[in-house]
């Protein structure tokens, strides 16, 4: 199976980029039992032999796996540059799958360029690029990432979240909460990488991949995905840097890159040189580092810039900063007459507060721009559906409310959920009243409508009692 190497984890459902709980279906306990057993053996071997290079993996990327990956996509998955929809790809699967498999095994597969679309950044006028692969290629990416994750899930560290099974945003938030509340933390470095997905150096990327992967057909696939380029305004642009943000393989590759550039370096090299405790929490390219001492944090910040520069990465100065945060921050802020600091991570504003017993705890609320955006998008939806039958309107509204509660319903954030609910109620009544000249809906009539067609009320998806269960330390 291998030879020893000398060297050593949202766009949204409509674009087919939603999470599958990792890079693909979990290899443990699902699907074809023969395939599951084989991948479990690979995982066990990777865990046991941390420097083993796997040289024979392509045969695990089967037609059956590609078919399952294809069926995991919703019907409204956005097509790539070839215009083929998920439904069409499924219907014509026998026509293209055999050729794809032959091309892969002969190292002749040429992935199409990804279609670039721009989506707004939460609460900002600027937009960020997302790559939309062709549906067939996306299925192959998911299948390949699924096989490779059997190996890399054994390598990735506990500080890594995002694009990994059982290690999503809520796990990262719960872990951050546990570290700040229960460990010796006094300072927090918030870090933002400038154009991360567009800056990954292809040469370094392939060096990192070759530490574990020696199968020439898999390596050829990865190289071709990196070089496939993006299509925008009918023009294909290729680069020696970057991986289009959007495909399953991009998420895996980005996690591999920072595993070597940041995670291992922090755990194996940095922590041993510090005087106090330190903890890294990384969600794909978004990360926070917690320190016991300010001096350690300052030295790390300087070293971090040099380390990232070696691998063609840069910090975004305006979005990177060191703040005092933790159980003593409130006391110091009061003594020094300063405003209490907050930190921003994964759509939440985190702040220092105390529980009913007077003990320190981390509070959180939906980040202001995110909440404003959710309210704006809800209002856009309400305007669009105002002439629908009321029962259909309620179904649509409740879908959007529940989706918001599912992500933002983390312990301590009920007030923000209520804000969206109240704004939704208020604007819905306004839209119902605007349906005709004589259609004014007074408060009594509105209450009657709600009794017949109730809106789903705010509820925490992860209350304090469940938060502990999401911690990954």
Image (cartoon, rainbow, N blue to C red):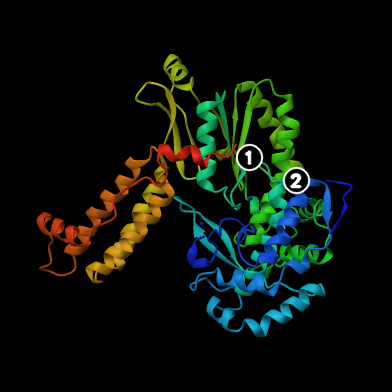
**Image coords of residue 400 (percent x, y):** 36, 59
Q: Is residue 137 visible?
A: no
Residue depicted at 58% across the width and 40% down the height: 472
**Image coords of residue 199 (percent x, y):** 69, 52
Q: Is residue 382 left or right of residue 286?
A: left
**Quick one: 318 or 29, which is closer to the camera?**
29
SS for tag 2?
Answer: loop
Residue depicted at 59% across the width and 52% down the height: 165
Packing grade of label 2 (10 A; few <14, some 14-19, many >=20) is some
**Image coords of residue 393 (percent x, y):** 27, 66
Tell me the quarter of the picture where residue 298 sits: top right
Tell me the quarter of the picture where residue 55 sits: bottom right
Q: Is residue 226 visible?
A: yes
Contact between labelled residues 2 and 1, with CB atoms less than 8 Å apart? no
**Quick one: 321 or 103, which is closer to the camera?**
103
* Label 2 sits on residue: 311
Count all numbered tags in the image, as a single digit: 2
Q: Is residue 303 left or right of residue 217?
A: left
* Label 1 sits on residue: 159
**Quick one: 152 or 27, which is closer to the camera?**
27
Q: Is residue 362 left or right of residue 238?
A: left
**Image coords of residue 329 (percent x, y):** 48, 22
Q: Quadrant of the C terminus?
A: top right
Mark toward the start of the polypeptide (1 vs 2): 1
Q: Quadrant of the N terminus?
A: bottom right
SS for tag 1?
Answer: loop
Q: Furthest-top residue in view?
A: 335
Q: Nearer the viewer, mark 1 or mark 2?
A: 1
Q: Is residue 279 left or right of residue 460?
A: right
Residue depicted at 61% across the width and 52% down the height: 164
């Amino acid at each position: 199976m291998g030879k020893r190497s000398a060297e050593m984890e949202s766009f949204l459902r409509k674009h087919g980029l939603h999470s599958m709980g990792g890079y693909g279906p979990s290899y443990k306990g699902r699907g074809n039992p023969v395939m599951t057993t084989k991948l479990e053996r690979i995982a066990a071997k990777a865990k046991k032999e941390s420097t083993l290079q796997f040289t024979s993996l392509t045969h695990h990327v089967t037609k059956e796996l590609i078919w399952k990956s294809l069926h995991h996509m919703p019907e409204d998955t956005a097509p790539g540059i070839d215009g083929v929809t998920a439904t069409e790809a499924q219907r014509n699967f026998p026509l293209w799958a055999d050729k794809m498999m032959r091309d892969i095994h002969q190292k002749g597969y040429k992935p199409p360029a990804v279609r670039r679309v721009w989506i707004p950044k939460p609460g900002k006028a600027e937009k960020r690029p997302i790559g939309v692969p062709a549906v067939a290629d996306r299925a192959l990416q998911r299948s390949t990432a699924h096989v490779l994750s059997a190996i890399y899930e054994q390598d990735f560290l506990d500080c890594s979240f995002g694009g990994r099974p059982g290690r999503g945003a809520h796990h990262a938030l719960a872990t951050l909460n546990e570290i700040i509340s229960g460990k010796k933390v006094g300072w927090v470095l918030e870090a933002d990488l400038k154009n991360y997905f567009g800056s990954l150096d292809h040469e370094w990327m392939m060096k990192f991949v070759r530490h574990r992967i020696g199968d020439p057909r898999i390596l050829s696939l990865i190289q071709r995905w990196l070089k496939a380029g993006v299509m925008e305004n009918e023009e294909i642009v290729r680069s020696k840097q970057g991986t289009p943000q959007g495909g399953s393989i991009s998420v895996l590759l980005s996690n591999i890159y920072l595993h070597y550039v940041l995670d291992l370096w922090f755990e194996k090299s940095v922590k041993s040189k510090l005087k106090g405790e330190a903890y890294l929490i990384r969600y794909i390219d978004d990360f926070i580092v917690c320190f016991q001492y300010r001096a350690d944090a300052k030295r790390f910040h300087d070293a971090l810039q040099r380390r990232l520069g070696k691998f063609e990465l840069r910090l975004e100065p305006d979005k990177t900063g060191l703040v005092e945060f933790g159980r003593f921050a409130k006391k110091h802020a009061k003594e020094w007459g300063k405003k209490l600091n907050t930190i921003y991570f994964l759509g939440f504003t985190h702040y220092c507060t105390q529980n009913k017993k007077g003990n320190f705890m981390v509070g959180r609320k939906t980040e202001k721009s995110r909440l404003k955006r959710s309210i704006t998008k809800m209002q856009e939806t309400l305007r669009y559906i105002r002439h629908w039958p009321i029962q259909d309107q309620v179904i649509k509204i409740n879908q959007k409310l529940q989706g918001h509660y599912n992500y933002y319903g983390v312990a301590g954030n009920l007030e923000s959920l209520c804000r969206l609910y109240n704004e939704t109620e208020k604007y819905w009544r306004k839209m119902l009243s605007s349906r005709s000249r004589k259609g004014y809906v007074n408060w009594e009539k509105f209450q009657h409508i709600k009794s017949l067609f109730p809106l789903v009320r705010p509820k925490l998806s992860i209350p304090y009692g469940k938060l502990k269960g999401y911690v990954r330390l």
